[in-house]
Image (cartoon, helix red, strand yellow):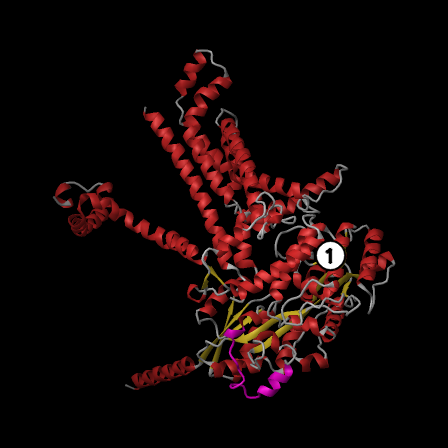
């Protein structure tokens, strides 16, 4: 039946007019799609639809990972693979040559191990603080309050800033003659070199990172909180359940899938910390805020003599850690789903 | 009919002139700018094109990062621009075109830039790949207003590093400024003072031999000056690895008595400081072995993958000619590498009296730089030496390592880099 015959005797409705080009396109695609379906069968159509995405993923992710892996088995300064010398596992041996892994100074690549120590410390503290702060923020923003939209925007705003901008803003606040010192000196305190003291530099790297990402994770948790049925809280209230018990018995279990996503994303992002910290502290003082990504960048690109082999080996090791974290998340998620189905 | 004929002739003339302009050979220059040098080059190139209508010069203005990160990949692939302005000259020497066969007067070209040609060619080669667009030299920049107000004379010729540090401390205490002596966080900046103290840097076998008594003498001073507050911890100790850090903002804000940096700062200091206070370059501080800064700079080199080497040589010969180099230096406030221009002096075009005084001091310093400091520019392993020195001394300043450990690490780092690069 044609469009004209459907609408004979009356003016065609707007939706029919708008749908016409779409129907034309669908009609044109009908023949090739029928051919593809005949060729691959109904079961193969899923793969056909996935193919474009997989192609992009392959070109921009899988092939670079494979190239990176290949480079990690080579040495020398040449840029192109064909001109590099194959050295087997030598780069990995260099990274792992160490008297005592807990003492980076005893390792051949002491900066690598210092960066691992710093990254582990950063991940543990930053993720814990970030998740707790995001949860607290989401709980507060979920309550009935005046100007709730405004407060949600306030917490989300830093997420919109580029990491470099975040780093620069805080650098201006924390430097010798920055805003913070100006205020402190005004109130009679001594000037502190926030970014030149080892412990303070790490503190601020964590603080700034939490400040910058809090809004994003709070938003995920807020969505989770709003999906919890209100009648559960009403029932608990009628039973006289206390606030804390309600939180432990209702909110937390039902929010767990969202929390799991937040923890996993925060973990992966924390392991990859680079831009804000690099702009804020440059890895210093000394190597006290040197993280693994900066080590890879410095080794592979910042020196005049670029050690691409060593940088590739370090990035492969970092990739293994990230895959491990993702698998942990998948396992936890699957376990939760199985428990939910029982 | 007449009208049709006219139209046809007009179209023909237009086509012919268009094909004539199409026939002009295109020469592309990849260029980055720190200041106004891109605009000055554009003016000069326009004049060249008027005199040479068969060549069209296209200037691709790019960020410094493109030259640093993308150019090496292009060159390795046998591609790239016809001419490029670059800082990493020696390490990429295999990609430069030897212009000798294409130049009208190779002898004059060679004579004009003889002291810096080794910086851009392989060891033992006599190729003429290009010329330095500007020389730089490290040296102290002094806030002379602070010195005057404190009643402390600015250390003169032959003043030692210790005398400079003492004078800077006196001024900072008297004027209550937070930083007595700031020092760029860079291995290159450190090496001039180390050579002045007697560092030999290169062993008899031609391999790096960095840690000796001269090197240790300067390293010890750097550590001590951080401990006693002469130098601020946030510059050398503030960042990790080989990351560069300067004290430009602090100097511009009048918080530094003496800033050890270099001649490239002059133009921007003139612009940013204006008439807020007086400043000037000081004489090179001395050690027992020398009173030298470290020379450096950027060069303009021809790329050997160019399809038009003859035209490239004509452009290069024009840009390297004495009147053009003179004009370029006078307008950009860069020190000239052209020996004829340097010998006759340069009338730097600036109304700021601090500029002329500073550039004259720096120009004098380039002519008295120690032979070893000059040699470092063409030394294959200078990059490895600078990187090792700055990253390990930075750890000492931040309190992460002791000097003795740093010396061992510096030697190991250099050995590892040399071994990796020698595969």
Which residue in the rendered view is the most extreme toward the top? A239
Residue B264 found in image quarter: bottom right
Residue at 60% x, 84% y is B109
Q: Secondary structure at mark 1?
A: strand
**Vertical arrangement, residue B347 with respect to residue B210, above or below:** below
> x%, y% of residue A201?
64, 43
Task: Give yes or no for residue B100 being in the magenta stretch.
Answer: yes
Residue at 41% x, 83% y is B20
The residue carrying pointer 1 sits among few (fewer than 14), some (14 to 19) or many (20 or more) residues within 10 Å by Cα, namely: many
Picture quarter with the N terminus of chain A:
top left
Picture quarter with the C terminus of chain A:
top left
Location of mark 1 (residue): B182
Residue at 53% x, 33% y is A128
> x%, y% of residue A140?
52, 27
Q: Nearer the viewer, residue A37 or B322?
A: A37
Label 1 chain ID: B
> x%, y% of residue A5?
12, 43
Range of residues picked out in magenta: B93-112
């Amino acid at each position: 039946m044609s469009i004209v015959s459907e609408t004979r005797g009356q003016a065609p409705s707007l939706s029919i007019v708008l749908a016409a080009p779409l129907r034309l396109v669908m009609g044109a695609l009908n023949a090739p799609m029928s051919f593809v379906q005949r060729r691959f069968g109904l079961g193969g159509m899923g793969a056909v639809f996935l193919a474009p995405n997989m192609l992009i993923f392959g070109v921009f992710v899988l092939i670079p990972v494979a190239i990176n892996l290949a480079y990690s088995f080579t040495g020398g300064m040449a840029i192109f693979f064909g001109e590099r010398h194959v050295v087997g596992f030598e780069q990995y041996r260099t990274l792992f040559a160490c008297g005592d892994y807990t003492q980076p100074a005893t390792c051949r690549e002491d900066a690598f191990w210092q960066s691992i120590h710093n990254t582990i410390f950063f991940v543990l503290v930053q993720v814990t603080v970030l998740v707790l702060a995001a949860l607290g923020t989401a709980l507060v923003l979920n309550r009935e309050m005046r100007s709730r939209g405004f407060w949600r925007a306030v917490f989300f705003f830093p997420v919109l800033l580029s990491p470099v901008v975040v780093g620069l803003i805080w650098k201006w606040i924390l430097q010798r003659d920055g805003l913070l010192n100006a205020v402190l000196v005004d109130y009679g305190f001594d000037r502190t070199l926030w970014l030149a003291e080892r412990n303070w530099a790490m503190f601020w790297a964590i603080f700034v990172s939490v400040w910058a990402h809090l809004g994003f994770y709070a938003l995920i948790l807020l969505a989770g909180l709003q999906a919890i049925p209100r009648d559960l809280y009403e029932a608990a209230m009628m039973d006289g359940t206390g606030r804390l018990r309600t939180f432990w018995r209702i909110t937390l279990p039902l929010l767990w899938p969202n929390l799991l996503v937040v923890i996993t994303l925060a973990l992966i992002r924390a392991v990859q910390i680079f831009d804000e910290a690099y702009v804020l502290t440059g890895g210093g003082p000394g190597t006290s805020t040197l993280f693994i990504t900066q080590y890879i960048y410095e080794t592979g690109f910042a020196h005049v003599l670029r050690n691409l082999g060593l940088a590739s080996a370090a990035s492969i090791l970092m990739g293994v850690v990230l895959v491990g974290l993702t698998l942990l998340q998948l396992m936890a998620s699957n376990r939760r789903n199985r428990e939910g189905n029982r | 009919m007449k009208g049709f004929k006219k139209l046809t002739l007009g179209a023909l003339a237009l086509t012919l002139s268009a094909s004539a302009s199409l026939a002009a050979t295109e020469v592309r220059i990849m260029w980055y700018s720190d200041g106004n040098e891109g605009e000055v080059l554009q003016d000069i190139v326009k004049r060249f094109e008027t005199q040479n209508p068969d060549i069209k010069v296209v200037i691709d203005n790019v960020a410094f990062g493109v030259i640093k990160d993308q150019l090496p990949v292009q060159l390795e692939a046998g591609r790239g621009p016809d001419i490029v302005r670059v800082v990493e000259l020696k390490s990429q020497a295999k990609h430069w075109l030897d212009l000798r066969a294409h130049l009208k007067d190779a002898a004059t070209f060679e004579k004009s830039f003889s002291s810096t040609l080794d910086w851009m060619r392989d060891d033992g080669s006599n190729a003429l790949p290009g010329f330095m667009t500007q020389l730089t030299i490290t040296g102290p920049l002094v806030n002379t207003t602070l010195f005057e107000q404190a009643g402390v004379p600015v250390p003169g010729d032959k003043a030692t590093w210790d005398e400079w540090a003492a004078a800077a401390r006196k001024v900072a205490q008297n004027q209550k400024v937070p930083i007595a002596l700031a020092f760029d966080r860079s291995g290159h900046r450190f090496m001039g003072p180390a050579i002045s103290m007697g560092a030999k840097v290169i062993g008899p076998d031609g391999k790096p031999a960095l840690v000796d008594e001269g090197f240790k003498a300067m390293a010890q001073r750097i550590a001590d000056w951080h401990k006693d507050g002469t130098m601020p911890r946030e510059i050398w100790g503030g960042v990790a690895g080989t990351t560069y850090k300067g004290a430009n903002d602090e100097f511009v804000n009048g918080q530094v008595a003496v800033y050890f940096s270099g001649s490239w700062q002059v133009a921007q200091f003139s612009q940013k400081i204006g008439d807020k206070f007086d400043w000037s370059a000081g004489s090179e501080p001395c050690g027992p072995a020398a009173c030298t800064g470290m020379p450096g700079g950027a060069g303009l080199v021809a790329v050997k993958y160019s399809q038009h080497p003859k035209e490239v040589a004509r452009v290069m010969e024009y840009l390297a000619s004495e009147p053009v180099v003179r004009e370029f230096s006078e307008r950009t406030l860069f020190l000239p590498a052209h020996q004829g221009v340097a010998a006759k002096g340069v009338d730097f075009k600036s109304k700021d009296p601090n500029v002329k005084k500073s550039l004259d001091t720096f120009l004098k310093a380039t002519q008295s730089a120690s032979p070893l400091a000059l040699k470092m520019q063409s030394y294959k392993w200078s990059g490895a030496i600078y990187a090792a020195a700055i990253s390990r001394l930075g750890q000492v300043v931040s309190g992460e390592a002791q000097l003795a450990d740093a010396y061992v690490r510096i030697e190991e780092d250099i050995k590892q880099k040399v071994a990796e690069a020698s595969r």
